Image (cartoon, helix red, strand yellow):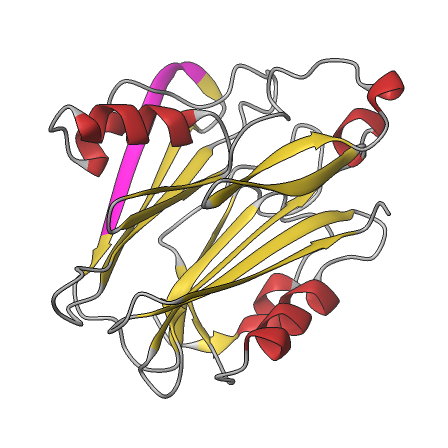
Amino acid sequence: MKRVSMASEIGATSYPGRGIVIGLTPDGKKAAIGYFIMGRSTNSRNRVFVTEGEGIRTEAFDPSKLEDPSLIIYAPVRVRGNDTIVTNGDQTDTIYDLMAEGKTFEESLRTREFEPDGPNYTPRISGILHIPADTNNYSYEMSILKSNNGDPTACNRYTFSYDVPLKGEAHFLHTYMGDGNPLPSFEGEPTPVEIETNDLDEFTETIWNALDEENKVSLFTRFIDVESGEVESRIVNKNK
């Protein structure tokens, strides 16, 4: 697939849903992560990202308006040793726990399926960054678990591995192809997109500004130095 503009791809539809961007800065020094959430309902829009340990979690902006927390309150980002896990649901904890037992990223996700929110059956999208402490041998993986074209009796599982990330390139995976009823699940492999800056604030602004103004809710970004492991993060919440 040809590499495309990150801003154009993220802004190509008013409702990509939840999205993960993972890649490498143009100077080759920083692993890059972006994770955003969007919402159409009052319940989905009533959220913010907050820091939790080395990662983040979602919480209700106005607890009095929280209706069903089951699919909207979770820890999208957790760090286990030299691995950073980012997902759109509580499978973050599944990956974290089962990898501690010796399972791989892909094996851990074999225990999970798409979300039980018919008729959408929202895909579970996940990513993991491997950044060994003693080398700069950075690699990452991404996964999507989705219904079989809307049929909930079957779960289709796809894992994508990027052993040699390219400078200035990321891969973008999101839950929906666009708005609709039911919402159409993402199709194909993660889209290769351009990272055009070595500055985290510019990276953050590019993603946030590309998202539909009405539907965007929160954004988390992080740069990790692939040699030192030094971490720099940003959180942007529409609700303030």
Nearer to the camera, 46 or 151: 46
Quarter containing the N terminus = bottom left
* Rendered residue at 75%/35% (across/down): 47
- Left or right? Give the position of 169 relative to 120: left
* Rendered residue at 18%/72% (across/down): 136
Work out whether residue 8 can be spotted: no
**Magenta stretch, main secondary structure class:** strand
- Picture layout, residue 232 above or below residue 235: below
Percent position (x, y) of residue 63?
Answer: 82, 21
Percent position (x, y) of residue 72?
Answer: 64, 26
Percent position (x, y) of residue 135?
Answer: 13, 69
- Picture layout, residue 96 above or below residue 128: above
Q: Which residues are magenta?
A: 152-160
- Picture layout, residue 5 above or below residue 119: below
Is 94 within the magenta? no
* Rendered residue at 50%/24% (across/down): 150
- Left or right? Give the position of 95 relative to 202: left
* Rendered residue at 27%/78% (across/down): 166
Is 154 within the magenta? yes
- Left or right? Give the position of 160 relative to 32: left
